[in-house]
Image (cartoon, rainbow, N blue to C red):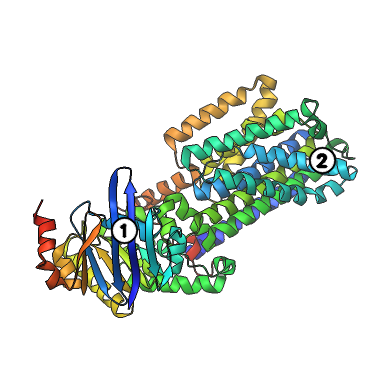
Amino acid sequence: MSLLEIDHLSKRFGGVVAVDDCSLSVPAGSITGLIGPNGSGKTTIFNLVTGFIARDQGGIRFKSQSIAGLGPDRVFDRGIGRTFQLARIFPRLTALENLLVPVRRSGLRALFSRAAWGNEKARAMEMLEFLEIAHVAGALGGSLSYGQRKLLELGAVMMSEPELVLLDEPAGGVNPALLERIADRLTRLNARGTTFLIVEHNMGFVMKLCSEVIVVHRGRQIANGNPEAVRTDPAVLDAYLGA
Amino acid sequence: MRLRDKRFLAGLALLLIFIIALVFPAIAPDSSTTNMGVFTLMYVGLATAWNIMGGYTGYISLGHAGFFGFGSYALGLLLAKLGIQGGYTPFLFVPLAGILTALLAVVVGWFALRTRAATFVIVTIAFMFILQLLAENLVGLTGGGAGLGFPSPPWRGAFYNIPFYYAMLVLALLGLGVSWWIRRSKFGLGLLAIRDDEDKALAVGVPAGAFKLTAFVVSAALVGMIGGVYGYYVTFIYPQFVVDPLIGISMVLMVFLGGLGTLGGPVLGALILEPAQLWLAYQYGASRLYLVFYASVFLLVILLMPRGIIPSVRDLLARWRARAGGSNGAPGAMREPPAAAQEGAAP
């Protein structure tokens, strides 16, 4: 069963066609890789799905319901979280506060409810411990290392227990040891029921982690399937090595 | 020092300041001192209210003087239309002036908050001047350049200032209470997230538009109420004096001096700048020398303490503690467990 379905989606920036009549789907419970050469439209697809930019045409459905046209906060509220290519956290908030920011609408009362607040704080500490960065709970986000920011950004998204998380280059700029830790945490979160769609250039990371891989080129899907099948697909080889 | 001790000391200091503020007119009952008290408390309230929007969300409004003037006119017109006489009764209508200002802020904010950064600043300035022009030109309603009169307060002599002093104290405390409540809530955390990175805040579900509008309206309502009391205090208002860009700039400067986005910063800024400005005005008459003083302070703050006194002192103490403890901790890198997340923190 597909959790996310993109149907004939298009986006043009002036004369540049970033996403061109693209259709793809993400199976529920999977870790799906979204790969393609630079400029193939991967991040644009993320931005379209999460409501950061408006589509020109096409449909986006999440759990069989259309989310096209919704703003980023409404998309998050439906259960889709995302991270950014360069880790984005709130630099003047502490690590713990960073995890307390995410809001999934539960009424005005929750914004001021003491009981809900205490419960969230406990969950945020658990999340920091899970990510092995509890020792920086009181440190300002801006003072953290890049790797810690990556983990913190992931933790912030996971705080609201989204069904689908879009990760934009989680392996970008992190050392091999941290990469292992990120992969491990993603696998464990996936085992708990979270679906991931990952944009990544590190093919070793993608092949190891993903059960499904979708390849896009010039804004269109050119292949999909299991990592082994995709690796040997002539269209994929042509996209990466040709032209 | 442990967190509990720090909080106890902070609470004690606040209690002491509150008691001093409460008995201040009895300690210094002469008119010029209580007048200074009225204006200082007015700016404590204004700066605190402005900080709810400008400090917490990072949206710098230079048009809050428009809300101050609107609140002033709203109360004056309400009292005139309802035929309310001078005395304590006009104070009961101050919340109504706040509500009317809030309604105006919903409309202004609806448009202004579609912009960001410098554009937002310009839109708020434009709003203020539009309001000033309207106040000057809607002669039938506002009296135009001839001004609008309030009912005369019945108090005479040294007592005249006292009811206004306590009215401003109540509004300043209300502003501080609201600011404290917001700062320690998830809503307040959302505002701070917007200040840091609005797109990221949206990506984690913060409904930035609704949050910003709420902060803008709350901030404007408080400013409008203070404007109302000010109008009644001076008994006659003119467009250029109540919709005065200098009032708006003063609020901003006080917040920047004390510490943008902090709870105590606006209070500290107002306690330093307003008495100094009044003292200069008393000493040098209407020479407007205080404007040179304001400009100098602004330059010094930007050059030496761009984050304001409270964050700068906090950093200095952290550096000093790190040095005393032989650690290389980066100043400002660590904070107490977050205010919003502390054990037993009020929601």
In this rendering, is residue A130 above or below A52?
A: below
Q: Is residue B132 left or right of residue B91?
A: left
* Above-or-below relation of B196 to A109: above
Q: Residues within 10 Å of mark 1 (few under 14, many from 20)?
A: many
- Which residue is more in the foreground, A148 or A30? A30
Tell me the SS state at disc 1.
helix
The residue type indicated by label 1 comes to: Ile
Q: Is residue A229 left or right of residue A167?
A: left
User: Under tag 2, what secondary structure?
Assistant: helix
Q: Quadrant of residue A28?
A: bottom left
From the image, tell me which residue sits under label 1: A45
Q: Report if the CB atoms under discs 2 and 1 are less than 8 Å apart.
A: no
Residue B10, percent from left and from top: 56, 57
Question: Where, quadrant-wise, is the N terminus of chain A in this rendering?
Answer: bottom left
Q: Chain of mark 2?
A: B
Label 2 vs label 1, nearer the camera: 1
Name above or below for residue B198 compared with residue B125: below
Is residue B66 found left or right of A98 in the rendered image?
A: right
Q: Residue at x 57, y 44 (%)?
A: B111
> Residue type at mark 2?
Leu
Where residue A9 appears, as percent x and y from the top left, is 33, 59
Rendering coords of residue B87 (x, y %): 88, 45
Q: Nearer the viewer, residue A229 or B328?
A: A229
Q: Tag 2: Cα neighbours inside 10 Å, few (<14), some, or many (≥20)?
A: some
Mark number, residue B25: none
Q: Quadrant of residue A140?
A: bottom left
Residue B241 in sight here: no
For image coordinates 68% across by 53% down, the residue present is B174
For image coordinates 75% across by 39% down, the residue present is B72
- For disc 2, the marked residue is B77
Which residue is at a point 39% across and 61% down the rendered structure image? Answer: A138
